[in-house]
Image (cartoon, helix red, strand yellow):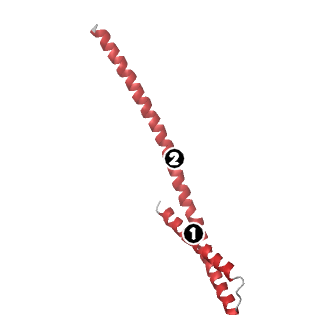
Amino acid sequence: MKNILDKINRSHEIEANKVELGALQEIEKELIVASSGAIKSIEMAKAAIKPAQTSLQLNKQLLAKLQGFTKQIKDLGITSPQKEVEIGITQVKENIQAIDNLIKNLLSI
């Protein structure tokens, strides 16, 4: 009887080890997939830095042009496009702030 119980216990131990091994292998596979996704995301974030920096520079140049244009039309006494230009200036300033924040966040990755 003891022999039979020992065989049953060993059988259960073997089955339990198979379950544990299977679970471990599944976790290892998921870890590989998750890691590869993280690596790809980081690479994409790093690749986004240069275009964001270019966009920031272009927006700063545009802001300077809009501010210069505002000064010119004020000096000439023209008031009709001033509101539209001010809206443009506000939008470009918001763009600059958003892009600057984006770059800071990307650089922290």
Mark 1 Cα-neighbour bin, 10 Å: few <14, some 14–19, many ≥20:
some
Q: Give the percent coordinates (x, y) of residue 75.
A: 67, 92
Looking at the image, which residue is at 48% across and 38% down?
29
Which x, y percent locates residue 72?
67, 89
Could you classify mark 2 by the number of other residues whose Cα lies within 10 Å: few (under 14), some (14-19), or many (20 or more)? Answer: few
- In the image, residue 86 sits, relative to residue 101, either above or below, namely below
Question: Looking at the image, is 39 positioned above or below residue 91?
Answer: above
Q: Residue at x 67, y 89 (%)?
A: 74
Residue farthest to the left, as pictured: 2
User: Residue under circle 1?
Assistant: 53
Task: Indicate the quadrant containing the N terminus: top left, top right, bottom left or bottom right.
Answer: top left
The picture quadrant where one finds residue 63 is: bottom right
Q: Is residue 12 left or right of residue 68?
A: left
Residue type at numbered disc 1: Gln
| Residue hosting label 2 | 36
User: Left or right: where does residue 25 sit relative to residue 100?
Assistant: left
Q: Can residue 62 be spotted in the picture?
A: no
Element assignment for label 2: helix
Whole-percent x, y for residue 51 in the image:
60, 65
